[in-house]
Amino acid sequence: MTPDEVKQAIQGRLIVSCQASEGDTFHGPQLMSRFAAAAVAGGAAAIRANGPADVRAIRSVTTVPIIGIHKVRHHDGLVLITPSFESAKALVESGADMIAIDCTERGQQVGALGLISEIHAQLNVPVLADIADVEHATSALESGADFLLSTLRGHTEGTNHMRKFDRSFIEELVRTSRVPVIAEGWVSSPEEARQAIAAGALSVVVGTAITRPTEIARSFAVAIESEYTRRNALNYAIGIDLGGTQTKYGIVRSDGVLLFKSAVETPAKSGARALLDSLKRVIATATKRAVELGYEPAAIGVATAGWVEETGRVVYATDNLPGWTGTPIGEELALASDLPVAVENDANALAVGEKYFGAAISFDDFVCLTLGTGLGVGCYIGGVLNRGKHYLANQLGHIPLVANGVLCSCGVRGCLESYVNAAALIRYAGNSHSTAAQVIAAANAGDEKANAALRTLACHLARGCATLIALLDPQALILGGGLTENNPFLITVLFEELAKLVRPWEDRCLRIIPSQLGYYGGVLGAAALAFERVYSLEPNTS
Ligand SMILES: [Zn+2]
């Protein structure tokens, strides 16, 4: 074949290098010819093969062009590619259409550049120069090489640290060469092969990634084993849930087990400094306890009332925590503890907890509602925690439900929260009970008035939920908080009411389920957040 005919045959196509060294399971001409046949069936336009025996066997099964090479162990103990005229001649006689030779310094030392013209003159086949850098390329071109191959990049003294596909090297070769450049070496995926073509290569030689089952198996095995180890390594985090009255905290294992838990009073009205000092004391106590129990916490997660930036600074907090707005919680606690700290709005943290450890493991779109003194909402949209552009999203409690209605804690009248919180339930029951839990207990005991109060609350909640269902089309609503405890009736009525308000209803297959995280859900959520930020863990869906 002439260089032009070769170019015609291989341009824009795959070349598969079919080689197996001695000791390899697939070593031997018979097996190599099968690999070659499989490669051609898959679209290879040419084959690169080592040694006359392999070339002859491959020639007998295919008509595509064969690049012949002969790897010979040199007296320095290292392999040289086609170092002599005799080796080139034997390859051509066995059916090779062209010859590739080592044109690096080592090849040049044994006469590679002179060999180019000798092969041209006596064997009349194209010569391909296997090179490792631009200097080799230049010498090979001056000596008449017909194609350049990047084969030996990463295999010479000067380049042996470059052991991965390097698109920029191909670009550099293409820029400096007047003959076609063929990319070879370290191409491990179709994407890298595509990049080689994008870089200007005429065609791409792929070897190991196609013809070395042992190496292919190894790459899968390593990926699987390392990810499995990473995923199943047990780590520990301190989770803290800063609420308006109590600060709950604990040590959480990365599989969601709460190993230690406790709570202190929140100095809610004493300002940011006092709140931070209280958090630091909590961290010190939890750290001490962890050491006693033999765990080493790797991160801290804090769930707090208020809305929080990714950096851990409070964007906005209500008067429940005066002075909290603007506090750089994350920065302060990281400085004090020397551990990575993740901070998040408490309702968002609960949603993270449900996603990692609770009822939402298999959901990508869900909304967590916490019904207590207020209405907390956290949600995932398409598998991502929804924070909003200014970290102020999910304030479902403050959607205006009733014109000129009850005055809300936010200062606006008629917010949903004022119709579905604990105070509302006591109000609906005629103020004859002092706590929401008492109303629920009375309803469970058959008290008609308490029952009606629960129904009223559920009807209001349904109107709010209908809004977010219409907006987000979630797979599930997950209900938690004091008002949902011991209160299955709430979910029953909410479901009935939503069926009346939402269209279409059946098609949504909406599930309404109780939270599985319990009283320390905020602590678990905060820890899940810490694990997510520190280890980039993905939810365990197995
Ligand atoms: Zn409000």
Image (cartoon, helix red, strand yellow):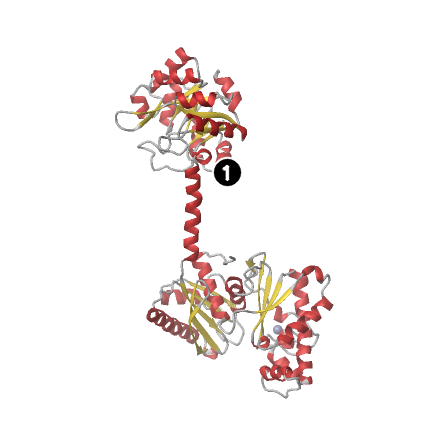
**Furthest residue toward bottom:** 432
Q: Which of 362 and 398 is in front in this view?
A: 362
In the figure, residue 406 lies in which quadrant?
A: bottom right
Residue closer to the observer: 180 or 193: 193
Residue beneath the point at 34% across and 20% down: 112
Beta carbon of the mark 1 residue lies under 8 A of ligand 1:
no
In percent of width and height, residue 105 lies at 31, 25
Q: Where's residue 278, x and y in %?
A: 41, 75
Q: Quadrant of residue 158?
A: top left
Residue lying at the far top in this picture: please name it.
122
Residue 469 falls left or right of residue 383: right
The type of residue carrying mark 1 is Glu
Taking the image as drawn, is residue 316 in sight? no
475 relative position to 320: left or right: right
Whether residue 396 sits left or right of residue 34 in the image: it is right
Can you say whether 374 is above or below 393 in the image?
below
User: How many numbered marks, from 0 up?
Assistant: 1
Please tell me whether residue 310 is drawn above or below residue 160 in the rendered image.
below
- Give the x, y percent position of residue 503: 73, 62
Residue underneath mark 1: 191
Find ligand 1 in the image and state its quadrant: bottom right
Residue at image position (34%, 67%) is 294
Q: Residue at x 59, y 86 (%)?
A: 434
**Badge 1, how many Cα within 10 Å: few under 14, some, many 20+?**
few
Task: Tell me, yes or no, if residue 191 can be seen here.
Answer: yes
Looking at this view, is 475 or 201 the one in front?
Answer: 475
Q: What element carries label 1?
A: helix
